[in-house]
Amino acid sequence: MIIPPHMLSPEALHRVIEAFVTREGTDDGEHAIPLATKVSQVRQQLDLGTAVIVYDQETESYTRQPSCRRTVHRE
């Protein structure tokens, strides 16, 4: 089930996003990326519609998945 970000309180959305980025591991290459930066990047993906929050009722867990929607970058 896709959960629109606006359906969560700001605090709940922040906690869900933090859970995504901390689960993804810490292999950032040579330079560590701060948690706040990762959270901001995921929030931007959700805001742009390039990623969605998916809730699995069976496992009672949330995941972030790419959406079918693509943004158009104009120059």
Image (cartoon, helix red, strand yellow):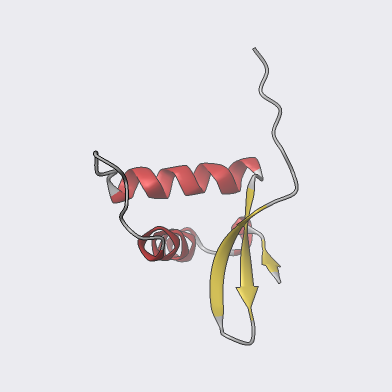
Task: Give the camera-side residue of 43 and 70.
Answer: 70
Residue furthest bottom as drawn? 58
Residue 59 in percent (x, y) is at: 57, 85
Residue drawn at 59 percent across, 44 percent down: 47
Q: In the rendered image, which quarter contains the C terminus?
A: top right
Number of numbered discs overlaid on the protein picture? 0
Residue 48 sits in quarter:
top right
Q: Position of residue 15 (x, y in %)?
A: 41, 64
Along the line of sight, the residue nearer the viewer: 9 or 1? 1
Q: Residue furthest right?
A: 68
Apparent side of residue 34 relative to residue 72 in the rendered image (left or right): left
Q: Residue at x 58, y 49 (%)?
A: 46
Task: Classify 45 as above or below 56.
Answer: above
Residue placed farthest to the top in the image? 75
Compared to 28, does 54 lie above or below?
below
Looking at the rendering, in which quadrant would you find the N terminus?
A: bottom right
Q: Residue at x 69, y 34 (%)?
A: 71
Residue for point 24% across, 39% down: 31
